[in-house]
Amino acid sequence: MTVYEEKKGKTILKEENLLSGEKIRGRRREKRKKENTDKRFVEREREMGRGERREEEKGVVMANDFFWSYTDEPHASRRRQILSQYPQIKELFGPDPLAFLKISVVVLLQLWTATSLRDAGWLKILAVAYFFGSFLNHNLFLAIHELSHNLAFSTPVYNRWLGIFANLPIGVPMSVTFQKYHLEHHRFQGVDGMDMDVPSYTEAHLVTNVVTKAIWVIFQLFFYALRPVFLKPKPPGYWEFINLFVQIGLDATLVYFCGWKSFAYLILSTFVGGGMHPMAGHFISEHYVFKPDQETYSYYGPLNLLTWSVGYHNEHHDFPRIPGNKLHKVKKIAPEYYEGLESYKSWSQVIYMYVMDRTVGPFSRMKRKLSKKSE
């Protein structure tokens, strides 16, 4: 090897060492930069945590808008998946053959109770209304819900007449109108301006604390009934007038023969049963969002026995053609689709959570814009 080649080799080796040194120093700089970034991130997280704790100390404020979803409602897709895997579920479709009998028993029992209280004191009437009549009238309200899906007879008009009959002890005509809006709730779940089950912006802006939420729960039947009238009124049809005249006929007959106390008992049973009452917990439990990634919730408690199993609400929205007395079989056949979902065992607890949780209110509902598929 010549002297020139030896010098050239040393120069190359030196350059390689310099490059290696630069790489090492570069790696060290990147490492220090990453460590500094991590430290800043940790500090920022700590500051955010302190901010959150300060917010908790001051009092958590509920949301000022609805939860907005940019996907379709979850039930149609889940229905397709379940039916592809368990086609035998279609065998559950169809009317409940005992629906007419069950409704007739409750209607006659409630009307008999009303007539028996014609001479009772007001305190007794209120007590019987809350602890007995409210359960009967709410049962009939949910029977009307069942009939809106034509789950008593295969012929729709028979369901409509039975709905008008079930409406009698409720005291106010609502059966026919309820069906119109309820079917839209299924077809357009959460759709802005279409689903009248979702509270209005006026309600949400007024009901912002424990006291107003408690008042809202007590009067929620009024909000539920009047909301469509103001937000999406529909002209009454032939069947609404039949419902109205039949109901007025029953109310007038009751007042004429038994007096105002009997009629008041029916109205009180409807009112208290739809307010701060265990049975009314389903109004909140069904779709009020306590977990942001879920918009429908089921209830698996004993009151399903008195409420046509409306607590199986995910199952009901997945398969509205299955009557309440068979909805539990859906969960039994396809448990993997329901056991991972949040659910409740107490409607009373749901009401308490709604009133007392400062982050929950009328804005705690999922909304979406109308998709072209739904039109």
Image (cartoon, rainbow, N blue to C red):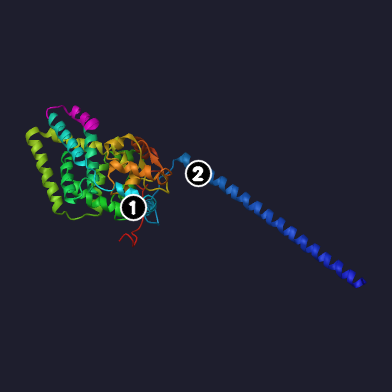
Name which residue lies at 7% across and 36% down: 256
- Can the viewer see residue 65 in this picture? no
Q: Nearer the viewer, residue 210 or 20?
A: 20
Specify the label residue 111 is tagged with.
none
Q: Where is residue 84 in the image (x, y as percent from the top left)?
A: 38, 53
Image quadrant occupied by the C terminus: bottom left
Image depth: mark 1 or mark 2 in front: 1
- The answer to if 131 sits in the magenta stretch is yes
Q: What residue type is labelled 2?
A: Glu
Q: How many marks?
A: 2
Please tell me whether residue 26 is drawn above or below residue 273 in the rendered image: below
Query: How many C-alpha atoms fall within 10 Å of the one at disc 1: few (<14), some, or many (≥20)?
Result: many
Callout 1, which amino acid? Answer: Gly
Mark identifier at residue 190? 1
Of residue 318 and residue 179, the one placed in the foreground of this image is 318
Q: What stretch is highlighted in magenta?
A: 117-132
The residue tagged with tag 1: helix, strand or loop? loop
Measuring 47% from the left and 40% from the top, which residue is drawn there?
A: 56
- Residue at x 40%, y 44% (from the top left corner): 335
Q: Can residue 344 be seen in this view?
A: yes
Q: State yes or no: residue 97 in magenta.
A: no
Left or right of 190, for residue 159:
left
Left or right of 63 on screen, residue 140: left
Q: Where residue 370 sits in the image (x, y, percent)?
A: 33, 59
Count neighbours of disc 2 (C-alpha within 10 A) and say few if under 14, some if 14 to 19, many if 20 or more: few
Q: Name the residue under label 2.
A: 52
> Quarter-wise, where is residue 218 in the image?
top left
Q: Looking at the rendering, in which quadrant would you find the N terminus?
A: bottom right
